[in-house]
Image (cartoon, rainbow, N blue to C red):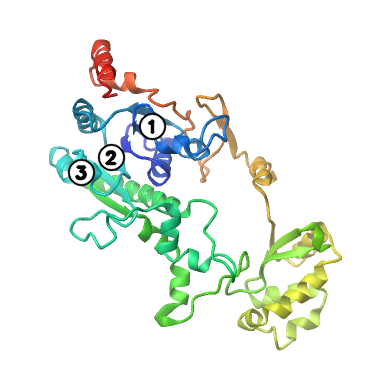
Amino acid sequence: MQPLKGLTVVTLEHAIAAPFATRQLADLGARVIKIERPGSGDFARGYDQRVRGLASHFVWTNRSKESLTLDVKHPEAAKLLQRLVLEKADVVVQNLAPGAAARLGMGYDKLSAVKPGLIVCDISGYGDDLARPGPYRDKKAYDLLIQSEAGFVSVTGTAEEPCKAGPSIADIAAGMYAYSNILAALMQRSQTGRGQRIDISMLESLAEWTSYPLYYAFDGAPPPPRTGASHATIYPYGPFPVGPAEQGANVMLGLQNEREWVSFCDKVLQQPALATDPRFTANFKRVAERVALRQIIVDTFSPLTVAEVEARLELAQIANARVNTMADVWAHPQLKARGRWTEVGSPQGMLPAMLPPGTWNEGPRMDPVPALGEHTDAILAELGYGAAEIALLREAKAI
């Protein structure tokens, strides 16, 4: 499963958005050469030490890449980077500060004048387009800040307190749109021979993902309320306590239509008359009466075990799930049964890794997480640098 084999991506990346995009290109067989600062590298390498001394974010987003250390502000390293891109790259990806790549000679206009088929993907918080910069172009943008600006935080959390998403959802959204746009640009290039500049904004990516609450609040209407883990506009849909309160057990369940509501009343609550109770005969009524309905559900579940509630839900064909911890996900029986876990190499030995979503007849590429600068000498040798020249570049701190 390497449809991108033979393509080379050169990336000036850090943190999550760009590394997540390029790792997925690597999963599909692309050669990804990651440019890192000598001595420290991608600053995500230092976020934590939770994976046998390696950073959790870095292990997740950087397998199957080659690490080349360059001080891109050093004149000799800048020349080397230009040469690498013009001789090797099909795609350039970067998520430096807006304008930084252009100042390094890595802007699309300059590169495409020499190499018209090159695809350049620029990822930033608010968009990096000089023709339409907008007032936020140069504003610093981290995941939490974009979650806030995109309105995501305003509709997430409890009535008392807004919350961010646990994962870096703004970075992930931007990474996914960078990945899909690069694939589309490669398809276009195969037809026209032309490259493309792709401008990915974290704000625009997450605003797209927040479009349901945007439309729910259309034309000045009130936005969906924050309801914790429950659905804001469908009820019952969310977590419900099971058994004695001090045990803290929960079951997640969700109803989508009136047929399921009738079955839920009959087989789960075992109160079939509730199906025609005028307070609950339509979803919008159940949403309005969620406090009263929740109490009925909680009272029904309180003498039962989680297994008993799940059995009733399955009998009624009501969607349900357990509220799993991270440890539960590591041991999830469905992931195990489908063979979704494998191993990848790393500077700390073999590590478990989840196969990327999407099952093909052939398996995906799952190569090691690179050590900082692990491939520097080999890549420079490809470009014709001899051992003595490489030693001089290292002595000059260019690499």
Front disc: 3 or 1: 1
Dot 3 amino acid type: Ala
- What percent of the width, then of the height, locates residue 139? 31, 56
Could you classify mark 1 by the number of other residues whose Cα lies within 10 Å: few (under 14), some (14-19), or many (20 or more)? many
Could you classify mark 2 by the number of other residues whose Cα lies within 10 Å: few (under 14), some (14-19), or many (20 or more)? many
Asked if residue 51 is positioned above or below residue 210 in the image, the reply reads above
Dot 2 amino acid type: Val
| Residue 220 visible here | yes
Asked if residue 93 is positioned above or below residue 159 in the image, the reply reads above
Could you classify mark 3 by the number of other residues whose Cα lies within 10 Å: few (under 14), some (14-19), or many (20 or more)? some
Q: Quadrant of the N terminus?
A: top left
Q: Of all residues shown, which one is farthest toward the right?
A: 303
- What percent of the width, then of the height, locates residue 273? 80, 83
Front disc: 2 or 1: 1
Report which residue position mark 3 lands on. Answer: 102
Front disc: 3 or 2: 3
| Apparent side of residue 266 relative to residue 18 in the rendered image (left or right) | right
- The answer to which of 91 and 168 lies nearer the viewer is 168
Q: Quick check: marks 3 and 2 in contact, CB under 8 Å?
A: no
Q: Quadrant of the C terminus?
A: top left
- What percent of the width, then of the height, locates residue 321? 69, 58
Q: Earlier in the sequence, mark 2 or mark 1?
A: 1
* Element under disc 1: loop
- What percent of the width, then of the height, locates residue 205? 38, 58
Report which residue position mark 2 lands on. Answer: 92
| Apparent side of residue 51 relative to residue 117 in the rendered image (left or right) | right
Specify the quadrant of the image occupied by residue 120: top left
* Element under disc 3: helix
Dot 1 amino acid type: Gly
Q: Which mark is residue 368?
A: none
Report which residue position mark 1 lands on. Answer: 41
**3D distance between C-alphas at marks 3 and 2:** 12 Å
